[in-house]
Image (cartoon, helix red, strand yellow):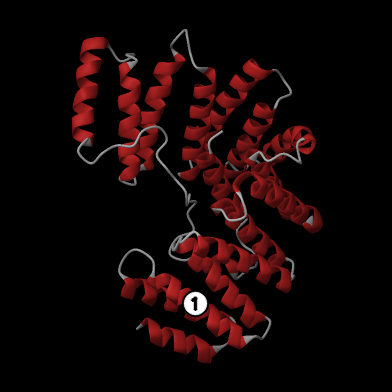
Amino acid sequence: MVLRSLWRLGRAASRLNCSASHHTKSLSFLSCQARMLSFRPIRFFVSQSNTIESLQIRVAQLEKEQGDNSLSLISLYDQLGNAFIGMGDSIIAATYFENAIKIIEKQQQRDLDSLKTRYIDLGSMYLEIKDAGKALKFFEKSLQLAKEMQGDNSKEIAIALNYLSVAHKLNTDDEKYNECLDLALPYMQKNINSNDAQIGLYFIVRSEALALKNKVNESIDCLYTSRKIIERSLGPISNELALIDRNMAFLYLKFGMAKESIDAFERAIHALQTLKIFDESLIELYRNLAYLYKRINNLKKSKETIEKGAEAVKKMKGDKKKLLAIYYNFVGYDFKVLGDIETSKECIHKSL
């Protein structure tokens, strides 16, 4: 199963319970929308010269000459989907990927593994754009296909159930959310010593469910289990480990475990810095860490962290002056909430 879906689902799952405290909801930098740091187009890369207009002309010609079920259309639909992803329009992109799936479904000879992966990819895309109904539809198709291929007790079924659980959570159906996780649990526990990243993802999602029930120790244990599996699968530094450490930090913070929270924030920051990923996710981590240092009355470390965050902002793409102004404005608000008016004023002044 492709890691792009793993990361997209992980980001979606992490946003379902992203508030570590009443204040934390205000700590997202620029946007709290589910994103995927390591995203790549699903099937094909599209060159700049292969424009959307030319692709659409070719689609129209093929539909006229061969009908709308031509196998040749699959590649064109995939290319159009990726072209719209490149333009940042996931909604239109998803419709083209769905058109490709409809053609594949009508064929007597189908590559079932490829089709199952397409269902997961498209369901994950709909999760990203928060269309719970569509996400459920394609994850259900993936689950049904896994049952047809593997029987009633397999890894693929457990993975499909995990994806379904997140879609049910997005659909605010907590009963089915927990039911899917419980159904997948026996298989996942049997393979707890594996290096399969998808099993690691399951324990991230299960940790979220346990945290919502205030089962602190069990939730933390799940994240540690997930971390071990992901590290075995992807190595000691990865986007996915940064996500786990981020979740761990917020979980510790939620339950008043400041030292553990600081350690987890530092690990997540180190991973993204090492990978040279300078974006909103990294800035969010710096802001929360600065906030946490202030909460434990370590103003020196808090201010050092603020400035480290500012240095990271300078390495982001875009208008550096504008991004810094936004950053300092947000940090100023954070410290105003904490009652540190002097530091708040300093930050607000730097935003001007």
Farthest residue toward the bottom?
342
Nearer to me, 305 or 164: 305
- Say which quadrant the C terminus sits in: bottom left
* Residue 340 in which image quadrant: bottom right
- Say which quadrant the N terminus sits in: top right
Residue labelled with disc 1: 308
Residue 228 rendering spot, x and y as whole percentages: 71, 50
Residue 316 rendering spot, x and y as whole percentages: 38, 66
Can you say whether 235 is above or below 272 in the image? Answer: above
Residue 293 rendering spot, x and y as whole percentages: 63, 79
At 63% from the left edge and 16% from the top edge, which residue is drawn? 148
In the rendered structure, the answer to whether residue 76 lies left or right of residue 184 reads left
Can you say whether 256 is above or below 190 in the image? Answer: below
Secondary structure of the residue carrying tag 1 is: helix
* Residue 252 in which image quadrant: bottom right
At 42% from the left edge and 84% from the top edge, which residue is drawn? 348
In the rendered structure, the answer to whether residue 172 lies left or right of residue 56 reads right
What's the residue type where badge 1 is placed? Lys
Can you say whether 279 is above or below 119 in the image? Answer: below
At 76% from the left edge and 40% from the top edge, which residue is drawn? 192
* Residue 99 in which image quadrant: top left
In the rendered structure, the answer to whether residue 89 lies left or right of residue 228 reads left
